[in-house]
Amino acid sequence: MAKKSTKRSNNNPPEKVFRIGFVSASVFGHEIETDEGPITIRSVNVQKRYKDGEDVKYTSSFNLAELPQAVRALQLTQGYVERCESEILLE
């Protein structure tokens, strides 16, 4: 399939979020045009939520104790993306 154009929006909310403790993996869908018609491809963002004083902040840096949470969130995300992208729609 050849890509024709990509439609992306900075205001695109995640289609699914998996959260383990303070670590989350968010799935974003992006529709692209192909020679066979539009398809959705997915990308994943992994981050950790923490407090800095009264402010809530996010980072993509993890310490050793947080790595199992990040790994599990990514495993759940991988399964979701595989299920979504392996479905074949019949017309």
Image: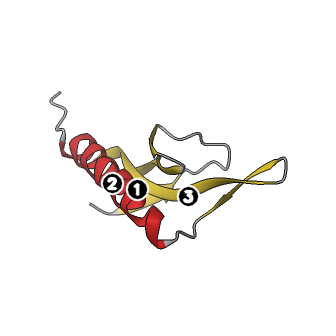
Q: Nearer the viewer, mark 1 or mark 3?
A: 1
Instruction: Measure the alpha-carbon separation of dots 1 and 2.
Output: 5 Å
Q: Amino acid at mark 1?
A: Gln
Residue 57 is situated, as x and y percent measured from the top left of the image, at 73, 54
- Left or right? Give the position of 45 relative to 90: right
Residue at mark 3: 47
What amino acid is labelled 2 in the image? Arg
Give the residue at the far top of this rendering: 91
Q: Nearer the viewer, residue 36 or 57?
A: 57
The crowd level at tag 2 (other Cα within 10 Å; few <14, some 14-19, many 20+) is: some
Query: Residue 46 location, x and y as percent?
Result: 50, 58
Kindly identify the amino acid type of the residue bearing the numbered disc 3: Gln
Q: Are marks 1 and 2 in contact (CB under 8 Å)?
A: yes
Residue 69, numbered circle: 1
Disc 2 marks which residue?
72
Q: Residue furthest right?
A: 54
Residue for point 35% across, 56% down = 74
